[in-house]
Image: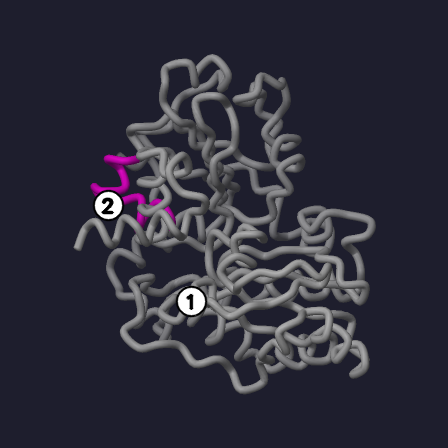
Amino acid sequence: MYKKLTALAILLLLFSVKTLSAGTSTEISPADADIMFDDTQLEEELVYPDWFKLTLGDLGDDLSEAKKAGKKGIITYFGQKRCAYCEQFFKTSLADIDIKNYLQKHYDLIAFDIWGIDDVADTDGKQYTERELSIHYKTNFTPSLIFYDTDGTPVFRLRGFYPAYKFRAALQYVAEEFYKKETFSEYFARANPGEYFQLGGLTERDFFLPPPYDLKTTRKNGKPTAVFFEQGNCHACDLLHSAPLSKDLSIQEIEKMNVIQLNMWADTPVITPQGKKTTARKWAKSLDLFYTPSIIFFDTDGKEIIRVDSVTHFYRLWGVLDYVNKQGYKHSKDYQSWRLQQREISK
């Protein structure tokens, strides 16, 4: 099924994540170690770092406190008590003393539980429960972060878990106000040129459709469409294919879709599900993609359903595939509620 399997992927199959993370003779970058963990639900509930803030019940008041302390704004954190991705965020990005100090210097971080029922007013004065606020900001995956400037305007969102170096870049992108003149993908590509422009070495799979890529015509077969945006020299891409996408349950779901793979830096011609002629590079830019692999799912009308554009392991990926194929987006107002319903049904 694989036409390419990198040395890293082989190692991932031979050794446990724990062994690799603890250190072996194999050279693994800190960013690679960050993304290697088990995403099953935690047995014990997470405890927030003691420097997290609890809301005063009004984010406007929280922002005023932050401004009085000389901060550049606030960040709202949306998590879950048994979220493995949240735990990894705490253990990597927030355990890095430089990142922690930089964050605390410029922001107050306000913590919310996406299932919480406490009332809170957003900076515009509108009232929500914690749960309703998380839905309002479309925090499909935890942890999610919303960055507010000193005027109380939400200016940037990170949805899901990312390696520490990318989270650090996002902090600097907002704190130094680069968001006012460029997208994060543009900023990151400019600040980290070695990360990108790798055109070769994609992992080919049997379920990827061959070119030409006319997704408007393809979607007429009644199947949803999944577009994999990847790049060369991408360990996270290798991990996706060698781990969650090596499992039969994932493959069974992915084979129910029209699936294509694009290198996000290539000039591969493509017609989008909406019928626009473009290239992989231009399309990725218009979608403001800044992480590989990113998977974007479209319905049979060519509308985006959901995207997975952060670190993703088996349980999260399979949940999204199931959600798309069962058209959960038609039956529930948000992804997390639908997944909870499915867990209740399976009991």
Q: Disc 1 designates what residue?
A: 80
Q: Quadrant of residue 327?
A: top left
Alpha-carbon span between mark 1 and mark 2: 26 Å
**71 and 188: which is toward the camera:** 71
User: Is 205 included in the stretch rendered in magenta?
Assistant: no
Is most of the magenta stretch helix, strand or loop? helix
Instruction: Tell me the kind of residue under disc 2.
Output: Lys
- Image location (x, y in percent) of residue 324: 37, 36
Tell which tag, 1 or 2, sits nearer the viewer. 1
- Image location (x, y in percent) of residue 6: 37, 48
Instruction: Tell me the kind of residue under disc 1.
Output: Gln
Residue 166 seen in the figure: no
Q: Identify the residue at the far bottom of this view.
A: 50
Q: Earlier in the sequence, mark 1 or mark 2?
A: 1
Residue shown at the point (55%, 49%) measured from the top left: 291
Q: Disc 2 designates what residue?
A: 247
